[in-house]
Amino acid sequence: MHSFRKLASIGGACSIPMVSLLGLSVSSPVWATASSQHKSGTVSGIVNCSGSQGSIKFSPPLVPSGTAKPEKSVKVTVSSLGTCTSGASTVSIKKTTASVILGSGSTNLCSNFASGASSDGLKMTISYTTKGVKSTTVTFTAGEITEVTSPSLGFQATGGTATGSYAGSALLTVPLTTTSANAIETCFTGSGGSVPSLQFSGGSATY
């Protein structure tokens, strides 16, 4: 895993994409396969979403220096999964909720941010507007969330599982916005103020 110290040397041209907790598009596109369409119940197939956005809020806030304190909570809000399709069909998302399962490495020091994220887990529940279609639960465990530096700073979650509708494997990319990327890089160097939250935009989800 690259450190944010190395990221800082790259420069602040990050434009991103979690906890992945924090949503996420920094990888090559994953093409959808045909979906078995049902009016209700459990739907099969592969869903590809692009343009996800939201925020990651830390309690206590991340700080550039001082004594490390365990994070009490990391709240991921997914305002939108973006445009989602399965094969040639549009998948209409009603709501996405996410919760972070904090690992032992999660502290409020920016210097521990990347390693802390890798110790966390993430659970997402995705519901659909089509009446009767069962929701999807996407789960990532510790070690499946990592930071990425290319093409922009953010997170990637791989090796996850989806249950319910569209069951199978899962992948997320969570690119930080330029402002958030710059804030966490500055904090990592021991400068600047606290970072209570980060914004992500342009992320992707495949499940």
Image: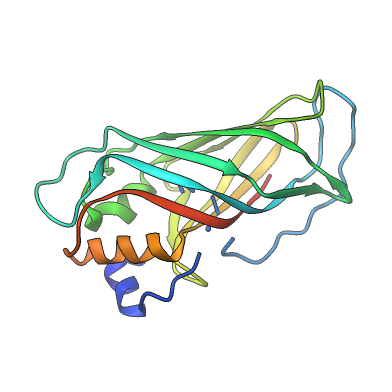
Residue 44, position as x, y percentages in the image: 81, 36
Q: Is residue 16 left or right of residue 87?
A: left
Q: Determine which quarter of the picture holds residue 149.
A: bottom left
Q: Nearer the viewer, residue 95 or 108?
A: 95
Residue 69 shows in the view: yes
Q: Residue at x 49, y 39 (%)?
A: 77
Number of marks in the rendered image: 0
Image quadrant for the C terminus?
top right
187 to 194, vertically: above or below:
below
204 to 178, vertically: above or below:
above
145 to 182, vertically: above or below:
above
Q: Nearer the viewer, residue 32 or 143?
A: 32
Residue 186, position as x, y percentages in the image: 26, 66
Residue 130, position as x, y percentages in the image: 81, 28
Q: Nearer the viewer, residue 40 or 36?
A: 40
Residue 203, position as x, y percentages in the image: 58, 55
Q: Is residue 27 left or right of residue 63?
A: right
Q: Determine which quarter of the picture holds residue 75.
A: top left
Residue 22 shows in the view: no
Image quadrant for the N terminus?
bottom left
Q: Residue at x 64, y 45 (%)?
A: 81
Q: Residue at x 83, y 45 (%)?
A: 90
Q: Is residue 167 left or right of residue 205?
A: right
